[in-house]
Structure formats: structure tokens, C-alpha cells
Amino acid sequence: MTPEPRMPAWLDPSPWLGGREATSADVERALGCDAPGPRELAALLSPAANPFVENMAQRARALTQRHFGRTISMYAPLYLANFCTNGCAYCGFASDRVQPRRRLELPEAEEELAKLKEMGFDEVLLLTGERTSHAGFDYLLECVSLAARQFHAVGVEAFPMTAREYALLAEAGCSGVTLYQETYDPRQYDQLHRWGPKKDYLDRLAAPSRAMEAGIRTVGLGVLLGLSDPSFDALCLLRHAAHLQRNHWKSGITLSFPRLRPQSGNFSATFPVDEAWLARLVFAVRIVLPDVPLLLSTRERPEFRDGMAGLGISKMSAGSRTSVGGYGEAEPATEGQFEVSDRRGVPEFCSMLRNRGLEPVFKNWDSVFRDEEGDRHG
Ligand code: SF4
């Protein structure tokens, strides 16, 4: 039996949890603090902050406007393959789930990319499961090169890689890597990741650092809310982000707040997070990290997404499909990685943003910079 992974000291949030209960004075201090950190985040997530949620929302809105203007950056996910050897208990693509398995061949990937272009997107996030013989590193690299010829920003959400592999992705035009730890609680992590390479907690934890070291410009971090104590995971997320910012100041960070959604396998949340708590988490994180892009996907209900746009959240997807080949064909309800909740199309979503005084931004990064950097490094 492999021993349970141990959390490194730089990540451990216990000094800010489980001690004395935060008070109203702590929350007020956190709301006015110039350099908030884990202590302030813990106070804003504590029961003492219940009467302050409106103040938190107002501060989150003001900070979002100050750092991002009245804009929402738009991106689209593209599922390349759903082969996977991992046994993540919460995922519809886990190797024990009955799913039709496939990968997009390059001409098919090109068609899906063309569909996203037609929808107006200029930033795409390419997703696969664990590295397999069907969809391994070389396949992903080819897809990145293909996407980089058409899109200004290309991100990858796949398996942890070596520094050399991340460098090759960056050379091929990948500007972002998303890799969620899912939960930072080592015990929960060990139980939920039943088998496969993803069982290696520490390797996954170290991968964002390798990506930044190798020249990836932006790394996306996140936890899957519902798997563990959300306050514990939120504090670890902040500590992880701070660790990366300290050690890799040239790269940027984004944070996401996915909640567990229904999926084939019917795993249900051990620590359910409701919308009110999710909203408060977004406000609190915006207050402690005022200039970090915060993402909200189509997992959430349209009404909730509408309310959160610009209220902490600065980057959103729309019209998303979570199955392989989903943009070119009608998506079967049971085949995605998880159920999409906001099924509105891009025009409808953008008109909602404009009605709220927000401008959707499809191109916020110019591939000219990427190409110039490639020339410098090459
Ligand atoms: S979460 Fe990712 S690694 Fe885990 S089973 Fe799903 S696709 Fe595979």
C-alpha cells in the first residue's frame, strides 16, 4: 500500500484554520487590508462574514472594474479526446465509465476549430484525459500547432508533463496550461483518485511550476468544489498561487471555481457547495487577489452566471460542449465530461453582457507577441 501523500509546508493552510474563530473585527480588517493574504481569506470565508456579504460583493465589483474594466474575456473549451486510464471517482471520463471513447483526428480537430472561429472565439482551451497511446503528448502537440495557426491564445488542459514537454508546447504556440489539483486535501485526494498516474498528488502539485519554468505564460489553477472542505481547499489554492507568483513572477495565474456537476457514474458531492457560498468564495478571492483573472464556466446556471459577470468574475466561456466532437454534432446528454448548465449560444450570452454594461472581449492577447517570443527563444 502506498503511503498517503504529505502536504508540503509552503502549502499547509492549518495556521489559518481551526484556531480561534474569526470575529466581525477580523472581517472588517480583511475588507480594508492593503495586502490581504490567507488570514484575511479565512476571515472572509468564516461565519463571522455572513453579515458582510453585500460589502464583499461591492468591493469585489469595484476591484474587478479597476483591474479589468467593464470587460469579460471569452474563451471556449474543445475536447480532443476522452480516453483515460485514471479512476477519478467524480468524472464521466474515468476508465470504468461506460462511454463511447474517441479522439478527433486532425482534420476533425480542424473542423471543430473552424466552428469555434465562426462562433467568434479567438481563445481556445484544448482538453484531453490522461496520456494514452490513443491521445498522448505527440498528438496534443500537433493539435496545439494546428490551433495556434488560427487562434491568438491556445491553452491546454491535459495531463501533467515534463519540463521538456511543456517547453515544446510553448514553442508550438501554447500560451496557457490549466491543471486543477481538484482537492488539496491529501487524504481525500488519495481516496478519490482510485487508480492511474493521477494518484501521484505531489507530481500533479509540482506540474504548474514546471510549466512556468518551461516558458508557459499563464497557468490555470482550481479545485473541484464539492470534493473536500471548501475553505481548506480555497486557502490551499491561495497558497499555491502565491507560491507560484513568488517563484515565477514572469508568468501569470488564473483561477477557476468549478463545482461538481452530474456526470455518468453519478458521484455526488461529499461537501456540497451552494450558489451563495460559491458567490462568497469568488468575492473573497477577488478581494485577496485583485488582479488575477477569475473564471466561471457553463457548469453554472445562466441566472447565476449573469449575476457573477463582472462581480469578481472576469473571464467566461459560452456555447460550450463537453463531449469530443461536440461542436459539429448534436451533443448527447450523457456523453460529456459533465453536464453543461448554461446552454445559451454566444450571441445570446454576449447580448446579456452588453445589457449589463459589460463588453465581451474575444481577443485579449496577440499572437504577434507569441511569435516574437518564439523568435527570441528559437
Ligand atoms: S478528471 Fe481527467 S484524468 Fe480524471 S478521469 Fe476525468 S479525464 Fe481522466
Image (cartoon, grey):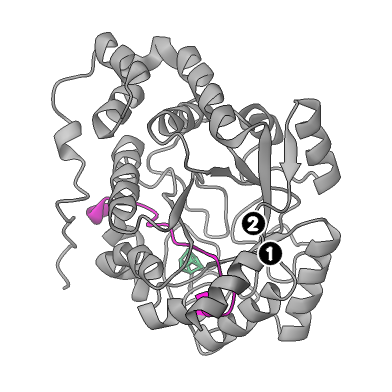
Q: Which mark is residue 365?
A: 2
Dots 2 and 1: beta carbons under 8 Å? yes
Quarter where residue 320 is shown:
bottom right
User: Which residues are drawn in magenta?
Assistant: 169-188
Question: Which residue is at the front of the view, 19 or 34?
Answer: 34
Compared across the picture, whether 301 is left or right of 35 comes to: right
- Image height check: is 276 above or below 341? above
How far across and down, in percent of the image, does residue 363 sit? 71, 54
Residue at 27% in and 61% down: 190
- Whether residue 160 is visible here, answered yes or no, is yes
Q: CA distance from mark 2 to mark 1?
A: 6 Å
How far across and down, in percent of the image, does residue 9 sit? 14, 51
- The magenta stretch spans residue 172: yes
Q: Quadrant of the N terminus?
A: bottom left
User: Crowdedness of circle 1 by 10 Å Cα count: few (<14), some, many (20+)?
Assistant: many
Compared across the picture, whether 263 is left or right of 342 comes to: left
Label 2's element? loop
Residue at 36% in and 38% down: 230
What kind of residue is marked 1?
His
How far across and down, in percent of the image, does residue 170 sit? 51, 74
- Whether residue 330 is visible here, answered yes or no, is no
- The magenta stretch spans residue 258: no
Label 1 belongs to which residue? 152
- Image height check: is 114 above or below 69? below
Residue at 28% in and 39% down: 232
What kind of residue is marked 2?
Trp
